[in-house]
Image: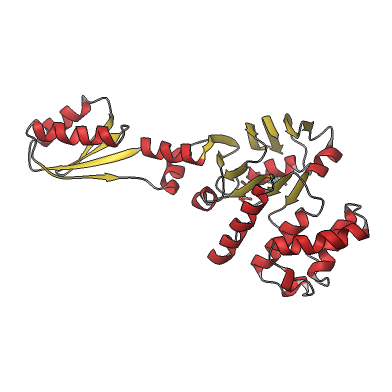
């Protein structure tokens, strides 16, 4: 549904995108994650036809964004990270205004708008002024706005930022419904766990480069690859370190007092085998445990030193 090929964007001397490439299949919820300034908004604005890339190409539904912006705009609904609201309008009038902007006939708008308000749980706020809505409600209204022309693709720039946990859960539920409707969704955040729970596929961007890409479960198994084992020995610590270094499932081995800390690439069975081996060889193992990094740690690990 979306192809990005070697996309570059310069702002003066500053290169915000340095040859970004990725593909997103139809019906996927894609999480675009990276620290502030990584280039997420720049990429999304290019996809939304609001910004021209310096070089490279981006396609939405087969249409190149700079050559066929009109077709692309029909296909996408875009919610920027900051969007102006028309405070003297009610929620219903606000959506009606945007519907009219898309040349949707009044009779059709009358039908669609209640459905959209229902979808984003704002039916009860239909006649409320936009400025009286909470941040989470405004965010949901913005989401409804991006849906007025029933686009196939949704591009949501940091939709969960500033939302409390309850509002985030509501947003997640709405995204699930949209996914069930077959929409392709791109959603950005600088908080990885927040995206992991909403997305099928994640791309991590850092300083204009894609540094990781894959299904959430693949990212989790990458996390498994980065297991760290900690073994406390009563003595023969150096010998045990030498023995561990010989094992193919062990990467780096370091010592912290009587603890040996070892990078481990094996699975659970291999971990059992490793412990058995140490015990059978007579090493006095007093404690054995595993430190598994959470997604946030992996994110920091993956993006560490990139671009520097
Ligand atoms: N209009 C602009 N003029 C100059 N530099 C810009 C402009 N827009 C963005 N940048 C710079 O480009 C880089 C990428 O910005 P971008 O907004 O795409 O990042 P982001 O990943 O979306 O970050 P954030 O989460 O803070 O929105 C940043 O260094 C930013 O300062």
Asked whether, in this view, residue 258 is left or right of residue 211, the answer is left
**Front residue of this view, candidates 260 and 271:** 271
Residue 137 visible? The answer is: yes
Asked whether, in this view, residue 222 is left or right of residue 94, the answer is left
**Front residue of this view, candidates 29 and 241:** 29
**Front residue of this view, candidates 220 and 105:** 105
Asked whether, in this view, residue 96 is left or right of residue 177, the answer is right
Residue at position x 85%, y 61% in the image = 111
The correct choice, above or below, for 166 with respect to 240 in the image is below
Q: Position of residue 177 (x, y in %)?
A: 65, 53
Q: Position of residue 37 (x, y in %)?
A: 60, 46
Colour logic:
secondary structure
Q: Position of residue 10 (x, y in %)?
A: 70, 36
Q: Position of residue 212 (x, y in %)?
A: 52, 35
Residue at position x 77%, y 31% in the image = 62
The correct choice, above or below, for 140 with respect to 155 in the image is below
Please tell me in which quadrant of the rendered image residue 234 appears. top left
Residue at position x 60%, y 37% in the image = 208
Residue 304 visible? The answer is: no
Please tell me in which quadrant of the rendered image residue 255 appears. top left
């Amino acid at each position: 549904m979306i192809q990005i090929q070697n996309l570059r964007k310069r702002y003066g001397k500053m290169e915000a995108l340095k040859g970004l490439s990725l593909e997103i299949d139809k019906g996927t919820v894609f999480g675009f994650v990276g620290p502030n300034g990584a280039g997420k908004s720049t990429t999304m604005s290019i996809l939304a036809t609001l910004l021209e890339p310096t070089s490279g190409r981006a396609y939405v539904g087969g249409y190149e964004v700079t050559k066929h912006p009109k077709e692309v705009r029909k296909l996408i609904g875009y919610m920027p990270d900051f969007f102006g609201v028309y405070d003297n309008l009610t929620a219903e009038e606000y959506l009606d205004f945007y519907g009219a902007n898309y040349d949707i006939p009044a009779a059709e708008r009358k039908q669609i708008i209640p459905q959209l308000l229902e979808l984003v749980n704002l039916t009860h706020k239909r006649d409320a002024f936009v400025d009286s809505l909470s941040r989470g409600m405004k965010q949901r209204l913005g989401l409804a706005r991006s849906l007025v022309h029933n686009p196939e693709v949704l591009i949501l720039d940091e939709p969960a930022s500033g939302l409390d946990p309850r509002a985030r859960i509501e947003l997640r539920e709405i995204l699930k419904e949209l996914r069930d409707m077959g929409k392709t969704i791109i959603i950005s955040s600088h908080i990885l766990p927040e995206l992991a729970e909403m997305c099928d596929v994640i791309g991590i961007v850092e300083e204009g480069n894609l540094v990781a890409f894959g299904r959430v479960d693949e990212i989790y198994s990458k996390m498994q690859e980065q297991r760290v084992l900690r073994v406390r020995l009563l003595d023969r610590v150096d010998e045990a370190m030498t023995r561990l270094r010989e094992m193919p499932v062990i990467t780096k081995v370091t010592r912290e007092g009587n603890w040996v800390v070892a990078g481990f690439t094996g699975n659970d069975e291999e971990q059992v085998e490793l412990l058995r081996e140490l015990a059978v060889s007579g090493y006095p193992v007093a404690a054995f445990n595993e430190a598994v990094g959470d997604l946030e740690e992996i994110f920091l690990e993956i993006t560490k030193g990139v671009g520097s």
